[in-house]
Image (cartoon, rainbow, N blue to C red):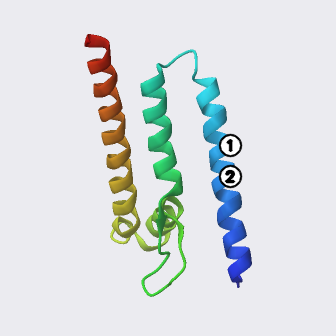
Amino acid sequence: MLTADSYMTAWIIYALATAGALVLLYLWLRSSLGGTARFTLLLTLAAMALTPAHPETGVTTWAPAIFVAGFDLLTQGPESAPRALVPILIMVALALVVGLVLTFLKWVARRE
């Protein structure tokens, strides 16, 4: 069983690994995507990777929702996956809204 310290350490390592992968992807896509599109894509991927969810009802710890949804889908069937997919969809929608707002602000700044 995880202790509180090992639980926090695992989340920190997971977040740092995700951030490192996103930075590498950002640098790799630098020449093929514009700045706003690249930022929106990476923000969407970060939302998918870092959104937490409870692994089971009644459990107080959190796990990455993408993994919870995958395990629920594979072990308990499609009926249990929406419990973890709803937070992911909310965060992805929020990331896309932020990307659209940035695109709109860039468009307004260019027109002036």
Identify which amino acid the numbered label 1 is placed on.
Answer: Gly
The outermost residue toward the top is 111
Q: Is residue 43 above or below residue 49?
A: above
Which quadrant would the C terminus be assigned to in this image?
A: top left
Q: Secondary structure at mark 2?
A: helix
- Residue 23: percent from left, percent from top: 64, 36
Q: Write the residue at 41% across / 66% down.
A: 84
What is the spatial separation of the Cα atoms under label 1 and label 2, in whole angstroms? 6 Å
On the rendered structure, is 54 left or right of 1?
A: left
Q: Please say if 27 is above or below 74.
A: above
Point out which mark residue 20 bears: 1
Q: Nearer the viewer, residue 70 or 110?
A: 110
| Residue beneath the point at 49% across and 19% down | 33
Q: Nearer the viewer, residue 19 or 108?
A: 108
Q: Total of numbered circles in the picture? A: 2
Q: Position of residue 40 (x, y in %)?
A: 43, 34
| The image quarter in which residue 31 lies | top right
Q: Which mark is residue 67?
A: none
Picture coordinates of residue 24, whole percent (x, y): 66, 33
Quick check: 23 above or below 111?
below
Q: Evaluate if marks 1 and 2 touch, with contact meaning CB atoms under 8 Å apart.
A: yes
Tell me: 107 left or right of 20: left
Label 1 packing within 10 angstroms: few (<14), some (14-19), many (20+): few
Position of residue 60 relative to residue 71, above or below, is below
Q: Amino acid at mark 2?
A: Leu
Residue at mark 2: 16
Q: Percent from the top left, x then y, of residue 92?
A: 38, 48
